[in-house]
């Protein structure tokens, strides 16, 4: 490798690091973090061991580069499970979780392809949490869950159907980062992100959780049942009553299923003591 090539490589790497830092700071600002602690800022980074090595290795694997020359790198093709800390030592908060999410690189592929993280949004004291699958392109761009076409439909369900405001509920996903090309979350990714979700639910303490789609329902309830077989009944998860229905994106593709979701929402409203709008 000539000096010039090495220099270009360094420059590219520097730009990549600079872009990642800017994205992270922007995500922290959106999460309400206005100050960063001095000296111990590595706390959030502890959740992801050998990140740099994993990220670099994953980048090479994604680029399809042959594993030659560099002295015998360890095999990294399989995604690894690197669960974030289940709970911080001190008092937890939604802002702390969002800040740790913004810094998280547990899933190297997602961390290297996301525009920003999407930790969740809404009422910090909600009766109801909507749980989806993962951010899509619109959510990745805006940093907020359910803001695309499916999000418009969800907002209509909440506001026109249930008579609530979108800001009355909290909306969150199983994954906080967009899978490339909107592929389904890998089991390892869902496992990696689970600590964040459980901390959010522990802070939110919702009476009700509405799982939107099979990925949300199966992951939250550790079930392999289809969404069609999970509809129509309540489950229990850590003190919350859980109801499952179709994902709004599915309803956009299959409008005939809207009547089933409306039946589910009516069941939920009855349990919540809400009158039809
Ligand atoms: S999906 Fe969750 S665990 Fe994976 S990198 Fe994003 S925040 Fe971290």
Image (tube, helix red, strand yellow):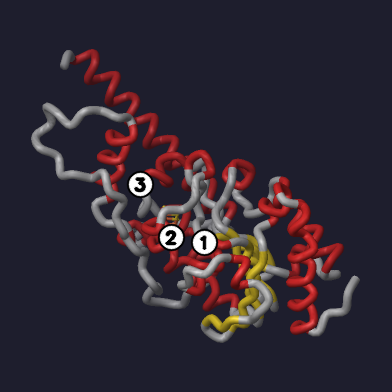
Residue 174 numbered mark, or none: 1
Q: Quadrant of the C terminus?
A: bottom right
Q: Are marks 1 and 2 in contact (CB under 8 Å)?
A: yes
Which type of secondary structure does the marked residue at label 2 adopt? helix
In this rendering, would 242 be left or right of 83?
right
As drawn, which residue projects farthest toward the left?
71
Asked whether mark 3 and ligand 1 are closer than 8 Å, the reply comes as: yes
In this rendering, would 259 be left or right of 93?
right
Q: Please tell me which residue is depicted at 29% across the width and 19% down the height of the picture.
A: 8
Q: Which residue is mark 3?
A: 108
Q: Are marks 1 and 3 in contact (CB under 8 Å)?
A: no
Q: Position of residue 179 (x, y in %)?
A: 48, 46
Which type of secondary structure does the marked residue at label 3 adopt? helix
Q: Position of residue 59 (x, y in %)?
A: 32, 36
Name the foreground residue: 240 vs 195. 240
How much space separates mark 1 and mark 2, taking CA atoms? Answer: 6 Å
Residue 190 numbered mark, or none: 2
Q: Please tell me which residue is depicted at 40% across the width and 74% down the height of the picture.
A: 87
**Res 169 → quadrant:** bottom right
How much space separates mark 1 and mark 3, taking CA atoms? Answer: 17 Å
How much space separates mark 2 and mark 3, taking CA atoms? Answer: 13 Å
């Amino acid at each position: 490798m000539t000096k010039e090539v090495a220099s270009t490589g360094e420059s590219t790497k520097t730009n990549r690091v600079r872009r990642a830092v800017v994205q992270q700071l922007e995500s922290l600002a959106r999460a309400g973090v206005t100050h960063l602690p001095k000296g111990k800022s590595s706390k959030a980074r502890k959740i992801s061991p050998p990140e740099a090595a994993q990220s670099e290795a994953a980048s090479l694997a994604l680029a399809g580069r042959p594993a030659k020359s560099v002295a015998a790198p360890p095999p990294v093709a399989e995604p690894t499970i690197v669960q974030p800390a289940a709970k911080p030592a001190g008092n937890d908060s939604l802002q702390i979780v969002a800040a740790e999410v913004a810094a998280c690189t547990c899933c190297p592929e997602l961390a290297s392809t996301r525009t920003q993280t999407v930790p969740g949004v809404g009422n910090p004291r909600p009766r109801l949490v909507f749980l989806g699958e993962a951010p899509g392109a619109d959510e990745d761009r805006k940093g907020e869950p359910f803001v695309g076409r499916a999000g418009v439909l969800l907002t209509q369900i909440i506001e026109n159907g249930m008579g609530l405001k979108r800001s009355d509920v909290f909306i969150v996903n199983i994954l906080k980062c967009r899978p490339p090309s909107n592929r389904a979350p890998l089991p390892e990714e869902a496992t990696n992100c689970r600590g964040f979700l459980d901390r959010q639910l522990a802070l939110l303490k919702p009476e009700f959780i509405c799982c939107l789609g099979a990925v949300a329902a199966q992951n939250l309830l550790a079930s392999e049942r289809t969404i069609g077989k999970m509809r129509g009944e309540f489950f229990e998860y850590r003190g919350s009553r859980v109801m499952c229905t179709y994902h709004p994106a599915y309803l956009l593709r299959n409008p005939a299923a809207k009547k089933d979701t409306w039946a589910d929402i009516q069941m939920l409203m009855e349990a919540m003591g809400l009158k039809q709008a």
